[in-house]
Image (tube, helix red, strand yellow):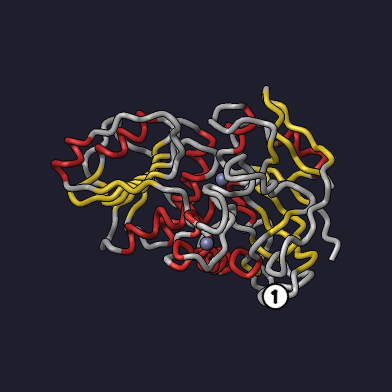
Amino acid sequence: MKELMVLGGGQLAWMDAPSPALGSPRSALVRPIASASCDLDRRLIAGMTPFKPPFALGHECVAEVLEVGEEVRGVRRGDLVSVPWKIACGECPQCRAGRFTACTAVPRHAAYGVPAGGNWGGLFSEVVHVPFADAMLVPLPPGLNPLAVASASDNLTDAWVAASRPIATRDDARVLVVGGTESLGVLAVQMAVAAGAAEVDYLDDSDYRLDLARKSGANVELDRVLDERYDVVVSATRDPQALHRGLLALAPGGHCSCIGIIFEDPKIPLFGMYLRDVTLSVGVCNVRPHIPKVFDLVATGRCDPLLVSPSVVSCEEATEALIQPLAKCIVVRERIT
Ligand SMILES: [Zn+2]
Ligand SMILES: [Zn+2]
């Protein structure tokens, strides 16, 4: 089978690899049919992260189930499923507490698409081994477009959690989304609107994304100096200074969800935050429990993830498309079940 490998030096290539086998009665083999680029992928390809190549790319996909172990009950051959980026057993104390990202049944950080916690392959690969099928895989409801939820494995659900959690505890929340990566900011705008925000402002320096944010329901005509008016800030930027601006735009009692990955230590305006009694949440997204809700939002038209994924390409086109700047892209593969 073929894997899409990050080779270093900005190089990406399809390479032959042994087809995975069912590892246990609880496992499954799946074939991605719609794999989306995560906002981290271009930095992984470019070598701008701590993760060193070679490794298989991809942590967002909808897949068809090829084969399941004898103890798997939730899915069967031919089902379409979302495959969460994080490997998790669903049964250890951390998983039972809802923290799939801290599963203790596998090495720390075990995940698809990054060389951390072992080699689990990537979600652009032709065949993917899922060690805990019932705990991880989420079947798509009938009629849901796989392309629209290709990103539910990571970015789309991350945006929902980051926006909806703080909005849910505030009346008439005024929201600022600080954009900067390919999709997370615009998705967060859509999710803030879906979560019932009273108003959503969007800050970015990309005209392309400002236009998408406007189409998603945000006001993008912001003053140069942001006043302290926002109950919720979603920071989806990799720029430490943009995060800093967002934090200082929080109203008293406000909350900032930081979902843009910043590898260096940014300057955090703690005293300004102290004076306003604000909170900052940061963390790898625990997507699995929230994927059904995201399916519902897409199915009912309350968000439109395809707005940020303008390119849908074949596997042959993937190596070129995935290094293009700006937009999220989806790589498709024919079904065989
Ligand atoms: Zn990701
Ligand atoms: Zn676990």
The part of the image, by quadrant, that contains residue 198 is bottom left
Depicted 94 relative to depicted 242: above or below? below
Depth check, front residue: 173 or 43: 43
Q: How many marks?
A: 1
Between residue 62 and residue 193, name the one nearer to us: 62
Q: Is residue 268 left or right of residue 16?
A: left
Q: Is residue 214 visible?
A: yes
Q: Residue furthest bottom?
A: 73
58 or 175, which lies in front?
58
For label 1, count other residues whose C-alpha is less than 10 Å away and answer few (under 14), some (14-19) or many (20+). Answer: few
Q: Is mark 1 within 8 Å of ligand 2?
A: no
In the current view of this chain or complex, which residue is farthest to the left? Answer: 275
Q: Position of residue 228 (x, y in %)?
A: 21, 41
Q: Residue at x 56, y 38 (%)?
A: 40
Residue highlighted by disc 1: 71
Q: Is residue 310 in view?
A: no
Give the x, y percent position of residue 336. Answer: 86, 61
Identify the amino acid type marked 1.
Answer: Glu
Q: Position of residue 278 (x, y in %)?
A: 22, 47
Question: Residue 56 location, x and y as percent?
Answer: 70, 40
Image quarter in which the C terminus is found: bottom right
Q: Quadrant for residue 69, please give it.
A: bottom right
Tag 1 secondary structure: loop
Q: Could you tell me which residue is drawn at 62 percent across and 27 percent down?
A: 46
